[in-house]
Image: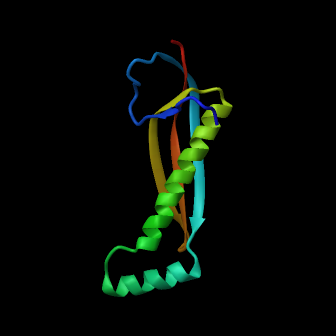
Amino acid sequence: MSDKKFIISTTEHIPGKEYDVIGEVFGLTTQSKNVVRNIGASLKNIVGGEIKDYTKMLDEAREVSVQRLQANAEKMGADAVVMMRFDSGSIGADMQSVAAYGTAVKYTN
């Protein structure tokens, strides 16, 4: 990744920047829950409350998906990503996918 500040924005406009659209970019990861996390989650289902190991797993997955989004954008020659969003979903009973997606842009000024 480059030394300059790479901006990933959930907005359409980056203040003070003009740019051309390059195209769609994505970053995707699928994480699985390990046996220890599954046992802990099963116990939490009985007593209720936040399942902190799952929350941590999803947070890590979100970070990985954003890193992959940025790498994808930089490979396309982008300076930034606008309109970034997340999507997530379960695959079976023990896997979670997180996708970060947005629009890669190249500065013109």
Quadrant assignment, res 31: bottom right
71 over 107 or under it: above or below: below
Q: Residue at (51%, 46%) from the top-left corner?
A: 100
Q: Is residue 58 left or right of residue 70?
A: left
Q: Residue furthest top?
A: 109
Q: Nearer the viewer, residue 50 or 98?
A: 50
Q: Is residue 74 above or below residue 30?
A: above
Provide residue 48's location: percent of width, then percent of height: 31, 81
Count the labels in the image: 0
Spot occupied by residue 79 in the image (x, y as percentages of width and height): 56, 26
Residue that sits furthest to the left in the current view: 48
Quadrant the N terminus occupies: top right
Task: Residue 17: give x, y in percent of width and height.
Answer: 44, 18
Q: Is residue 15 left or right of residue 106?
A: left
Residue 40 in view, yes or no? yes
Place residue 106 in its image quadrant: top right
Residue 104 seen by the camera = no
Above or below — where is 21 with respect to 64? above
At a point 58% along the width and 28% down the height, the residue shown is 23
Point out the residue furthest to the right here. 75
- Please tell me whether residue 98 is drawn above or below residue 80 in the rendered image: below
> How are the colours assigned in the image?
rainbow
